Amino acid sequence: MSLKEEIIRWLKEENLEVSEIPIPKEAPIEWAINAMVTAPFRVSISIQRPKGKTEKLACTMGVKIADQHKEKIIKLSEQEKASMIGELLKSLYFICPTCVIIIQPDLINPDNIIVTKIIYSDKISASEITDSVRLLSNSYGLIVTHFTVKLGGSFKQGEQTMMHI
């Protein structure tokens, strides 16, 4: 059984919705799997094997900032924006100090937040994969809660900062 097939099996054993992601030939990714977490939030997490990087996997989750929150962010001063995003980054690094966190296009005008957990080959196991999925799901919850508490809005599924698929 290949590593990809094993990972799919591990994810399905956790009752996650699993699908393979089609990869264009020119993409720097050998293969990718989508794992959909359904509780407590509906979160899509991608597990990827970069081309030529057999020693690691990347588990990634992205969040698109809701339009209602972007409208409120625009009204904040640059200092207030930096403070709010700095507080979020501090919380994210606290729960995952080794994660790669990217805020696009920049810290002052966030549109997307991408969190990636790298897993090296000596750590690849069912528990490491599923723990990484839970970690990214928790990161999603933290991001959604942060924006909703700081900027207002609903905690109902689909009415808060939206998951980027």
Image: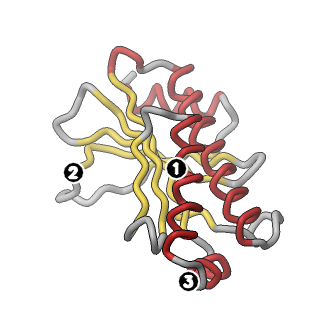
Contact, CB < 8 Å: mark 1 with mark 3?
Answer: no
Quick check: can you spot residue 13? yes
Secondary structure, mark 2, is: loop
Residue sitting at 48 percent across and 66 percent down? 112
Three-letter amino acid code at disc 2? Pro
Q: N-terminal of the two: label 1 or label 2?
A: 2
Report the label total: 3
Q: Tell me the distance, in whole angstroms, between the alpha carbons under discs 2 and 3.
A: 35 Å
- Crowding near pointer 2: few (<14 within 10 Å), some, many (20+)? few
Q: Tell me the distance, in whole angstroms, between the alpha carbons under discs 1 and 2.
A: 27 Å
Pointer 3 residue: 74
Query: Depth check: 49 or 147 in front?
Result: 147
Q: Which mark is residue 140?
A: none
Pointer 1 residue: 89
Residue 152 is left or right of residue 130, and the answer is right
Query: Depth check: 142 or 63 in front?
Result: 142
* 1 vs 2, front mark: 1
Three-letter amino acid code at disc 3? Ile
Residue sitting at 65 percent across and 42 percent down? 138
Query: Depth check: 21 or 50 in front?
Result: 50
Pointer 2 residue: 28
- Crowding near pointer 3: few (<14 within 10 Å), some, many (20+)? few
Secondary structure, mark 1, is: helix
Three-letter amino acid code at disc 1? Leu
Q: Tell me the distance, in whole angstroms, between the alpha carbons under discs 1 and 3.
A: 19 Å
